[in-house]
Image: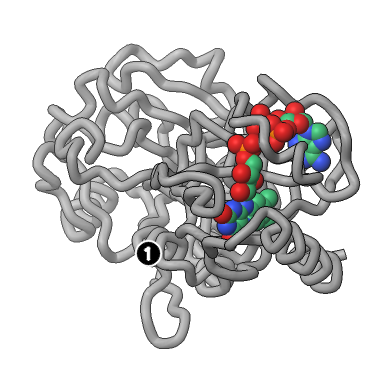
């Protein structure tokens, strides 16, 4: 497993017991939101360099993302929560995900101080892998050239990872967020290299689903990007079993005027109480837009057809 190691304050004296096994290896610092195919290429390179220096492969993420503190109104919603990132890094052989608390004065450090505290003192890195657009230190004052100079001075190997493209454009977390929120699920999946996963807590809804034969788990407290309004096919894990699901995102125009967005999951071939549970939902297929039907009967006919489509494509 990729171990998650929280680091509250990078300027503290290194806790050599807790950091045992994480020092003297290859590191990469970044947000790695989504752990997409561009990240995957970099992580592969990180694993190889770690092996060549005979140490661990360590990713360092700043959490929350610096933008959340510096420009909260512009900060993007995340694609992945920290445990999910570690889970997605595991197949790439990453030994640890060190999570630095951004609020602990980290953003006030100059590039030199950041390098000294994190890269030298805490992790004693032998090698670093970064993309060409890496910035670090207060006000993003340090760039890849700055990092190169600091690494040379300390005999640390620096490798620059080439950006990965899809259809001639660089793969990025921003591009994936845009695909998801504009309804291009296939575009997002192609860049993620896996299905987009969201999680939420099941709360009480209007209690209508069951009356039309399609109970839906209504999700709240979703802390990652919610895909565009529409109907999707996917999978959820319930009681350790993977089940097919029909997902509705949007208002319920057939029943009410309320235009607020809801996220509802009908789990196919399942019956049980899910209230207060947390549900992971994988999005595999976009089925259609949300429609205002003239009657509940027409909605039910459409739901039956949606579920046939989902079974045919995903079962
Ligand atoms: C797969 C799926 C697709 C749906 N599509 C629509 C739709 O196109 N239009 C609509 O008004 N409601 C749609 N619904 C939402 C139902 O209106 C909603 O599940 C029902 O109102 C139950 O709400 P409740 O969970 O709050 O009781 C869909 C629900 C599911 C599970
Ligand atoms: N197949 C299923 N898919 C989703 N939820 C289900 C299913 N079977 C039972 N449930 C339970 O029923 C609840 C949904 O019933 P519903 O009538 O739609 O009420 P609500 O409006 O409160 O969501 C879910 O929250 C869950 O606890």
In the picture, measured across the screen, residue 126 lies left or right of residue 4, that is left
Residue 94 point in image, percent of width and height: 61, 45
Residue 213 falls left or right of residue 294: right
Number of numbered discs present?
A: 1
Residue at 38% across / 28% down in the picture? 100
- The answer to which image quadrant residue 120 occupies is top left
The quadrant of the image that shows the C terminus is bottom right
Q: Residue at x 67, y 40 (%)?
A: 280
Residue occupying the point 10% across, 47% down: 141
Q: Residues within 10 Å of mark 1 (few under 14, many from 20)?
A: some
Relative height, residue 164 to residue 233 (above, below): below
Residue 222 versus residue 159 in the image, above or below: above
Image location (x, y in percent) of residue 209: 70, 40
Please state the horizontal and vertical placement of residue 122, each as a whole percent of the image: 39, 26
Scheme of colours in the image: one colour
Helix, strand or loop at label 1? It is helix
Residue that carries the numbered disc 1 in the rendered image: 178
Towards the viewer: 273 or 26: 273
State which quarter of the image contains the N terminus.
Answer: top right
> Looking at the image, which residue sits at the far front?
294
Q: Is residue 98 above or below residue 195?
A: above
Q: Residue at x 85, y 72 (%)?
A: 312
- Name the one closer to the observer, 117 or 298: 298
> Left of 119 or right of it: where is 68?
left
Comparing 157 with 282, the one in front is 282
Q: Is residue 68 visible?
A: yes
């Amino acid at each position: 497993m990729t171990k998650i190691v929280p680091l509250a304050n990078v300027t503290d004296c290194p806790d050599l017991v807790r950091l045992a096994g994480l020092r003297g290896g290859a590191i990469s610092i970044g947000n790695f939101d989504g752990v997409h195919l561009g990240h995957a290429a970099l992580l592969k390179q990180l694993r190889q360099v770690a092996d060549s220096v005979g140490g661990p492969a360590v990713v360092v993420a700043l959490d929350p993302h610096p933008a959340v503190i510096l420009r909260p109104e512009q900060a993007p919603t995340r694609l992945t929560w920290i445990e999910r990132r570690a889970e997605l890094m595991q197949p790439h052989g990453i030994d640890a995900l060190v999570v630095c608390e951004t609020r602990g004065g980290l953003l006030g450090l100059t590039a030199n101080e950041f390098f000294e505290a994190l890269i030298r003192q805490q992790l004693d890195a032998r090698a670093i892998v970064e993309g060409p657009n890496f910035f670090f230190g207060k006000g993003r004052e340090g760039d890849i050239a700055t990092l190169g100079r600091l690494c040379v001075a300390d005999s640390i190997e620096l490798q620059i990872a080439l950006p990965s493209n899809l259809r001639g454009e660089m793969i990025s977390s921003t591009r994936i967020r845009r695909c998801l929120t504009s309804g291009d699920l296939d575009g997002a999946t192609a860049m993620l290299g896996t299905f987009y996963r969201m999680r939420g807590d099941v709360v009480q809804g209007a209690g209508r689903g069951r009356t039309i034969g399609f109970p839906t788990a209504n999700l709240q407290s979703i802390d990652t990007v919610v895909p565009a309004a529409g109907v999707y096919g996917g999978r959820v894990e319930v009681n350790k079993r993977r089940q097919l699901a029909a997902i509705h995102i949007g208002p319920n125009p057939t029943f009410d005027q309320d235009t607020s967005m809801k996220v509802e999951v009908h789990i196919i071939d399942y019956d049980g109480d899910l209230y207060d549970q947390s549900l992971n939902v994988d999005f595999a297929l976009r089925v259609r837009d949300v429609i205002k039907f003239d009657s509940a009967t027409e909605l039910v006919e459409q739901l039956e057809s949606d579920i046939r489509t989902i079974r045919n494509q995903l079962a």
